[in-house]
């Protein structure tokens, strides 16, 4: 009985794990990242066909990045499958 209860509790916790949004909340969109929301899920090469005026940073898995925060900079997060997984400001 204790094992069943443990499985149920752990299963409930897994569902409560926070999901990171693909783009910033409207009030936090200081870099106009939501303009490029349609790129989420597409291949990283899609960035080659988009004109973005301003600061841009493309972050791939295991890339070293600085911790400086620039609210006007758009960060494109690329996943292991070379697709755009998230877009953030900073």
Image (cartoon, rainbow, N blue to C red):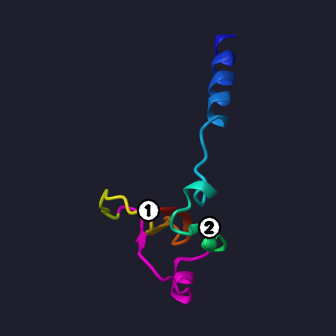
Residue 26: where, in percent of width, then height? Answer: 63, 58
Mark 1 Cα within 10 Å, few/some/many (few <14, many 20+)? some
Residue 80, horizontal then vertical, whole percent: 49, 65
Indicate the quadrant where residue 87 lies: bottom right
Label 2 – label 1 distance at C-alpha: 14 Å
User: Does residue 26 lie above or below 82 as drawn?
Assistant: above
The residue drawn where x is 58% and y is 58% is: 24
Q: Quadrant of the C terminus?
A: bottom left
52 falls in the magenta region: yes
Q: Is residue 25 visible?
A: no
* Residue 68 left/right relative to 6: left
Q: Is residue 64 visible?
A: yes
Q: Is 18 or 30 nearer to us in this picture? A: 30
69 shown above or below 82 = above
Tell me residue 60's x, y (percent).
Answer: 42, 67
**Quadrant where the N terminus is found in the figure:** top right
Question: Vertical placement of 1 versus 7: above or below?
Answer: above
**The residue stretch that appears in magenta:** 42-62
Residue 24: give its label. none
Q: Residue, x 43% and y 69% (percent of image)?
A: 73
Tag nearer the camera, 2 or 1: 1
Name the residue at 53% across, 87% down. Answer: 51
**Callout 2 crowding tier (Cα within 10 Å): few <14, some 14–19, many ≥20:** some
Mark 1 lies on residue: 71
* 7, 32: nearer the viewer: 32
* In front of the other: 3 or 76: 76
Identity of the residue furthest to the top in this view: 1
Q: Earlier in the sequence, mark 2 or mark 1?
A: 2
> Which residue carries the number 2 mark?
34
Residue 68 in the image: state x and y as whole percent.
31, 59
* Element assignment for label 1: loop
């Amino acid at each position: 009985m204790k094992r069943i209860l443990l499985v149920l509790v752990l299963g409930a916790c897994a569902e409560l794990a926070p999901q990171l949004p693909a783009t910033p909340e409207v009030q936090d969109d200081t870099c106009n990242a939501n303009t490029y929301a349609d790129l989420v899920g597409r291949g990283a090469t899609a960035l080659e066909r988009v004109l973005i005026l301003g600061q841009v940073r493309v972050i791939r898995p295991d890339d070293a990045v600085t911790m400086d925060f620039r609210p006007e900079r758009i960060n494109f997060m690329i996943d292991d499958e070379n697709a755009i997984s998230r877009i953030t400001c900073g």
